[in-house]
Amino acid sequence: MSRALHDVATGTLFGVALNYQGLLNQRLAEFEQAPYQKPPVKPVLFIKTPNTRNRHAAPVVYPQGVERLQPGPALGVVIGKRASRVSVEQALEHVAGYTIVNEFSLPEDSYYRPAVKAKCRDGFCVLGPELVPTAQVADPHQLAIELFVNGELRQHNSTANLVRNIPQLIAEISEFMTLHAGDVLITGTPEGRVDVLPGDQVEVRISGLGRLANPIVAEQEQR
């Protein structure tokens, strides 16, 4: 039975950059240049701070003074019990369930160093609308992810295209950092991010997990 997400997913929000194969392939030439010389060999992580938390149907604010805002459809993995140095084989035992995430961001110059200013604006991480337990998701690596803007399909991908699957992520992250019940892993956003504007209605659908929809509203001038 599905549960109210915001009663469960109360911990840290961990994002994973460059975790779709198509997106990684698009950046390979860039990664071969200085100073990096090669693609990342470990997950590229960032944190969505508590002020970014947002809910289904709540507005997402288009900040003043920015040129572009981009939604990021993603599968969210909610940790169900403490995970420290867990193996790939045992990793899914630490998962409570799955949810939809829309990880909003301003366009960035560097995937290696995701910018706090781009990632951590108020309301830039929408989660929900509910937690779907692991028992109800036959294979989290075969889920279709779709992004609609004003009812038009703008992105389509599948969790089959993750660079690192969920057990790999949990194992690699818990190798150096304990994950706690209520933490959420945002498993990555696919290539082809699109721009949205005030007045747009943005919706993410993931097969078996439902739909997550939010209006984009303009930030009011401070008086």
Image (tube, rainbow, N blue to C red):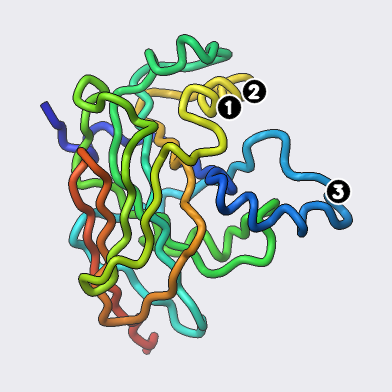
Q: Distance between the residues labelled 1 and 2?
A: 6 Å
* Mark 2 vs 3, N-terminal side: 3
Which of the 4 image quarters holds residue 194? bottom left
The residue depicted at 37 percent of the width and 39 percent of the height is: 76
Task: Estimate the x, y position of residue 222 in percent, counting from the top left.
Answer: 39, 85
The amino acid marked with disc number 2 is Phe
The amino acid marked with disc number 3 is Gln
Badge 2 crowding class, 10 Å Cα cut-off, few under 14, some 14 to 19, many 20 or more, is few
Q: Which of 32 and 48 is in front in this view?
A: 32
Which of the 4 image quarters holds residue 180? top left
Q: Which of 85 and 181 is in front in this view?
A: 85
Q: Is mark 1 on a helix, strand or loop?
A: helix
Q: Which mark is residue 129?
A: none
> Is the C-beta separation of discs 1 and 2 under 8 Å?
yes
* Mark 3 vs 1, N-terminal side: 3
Q: Mark 3 points at which residue?
A: 37
The amino acid marked with disc number 1 is Ile
Task: Estimate the x, y position of residue 102 in percent, counting from the top left.
Answer: 36, 55
Q: Mark 1 points at which residue?
A: 173
Q: Which of 144 and 135 is in front in this view?
A: 144
Q: How far apart are marks 2 and 3 (CA)?
A: 24 Å
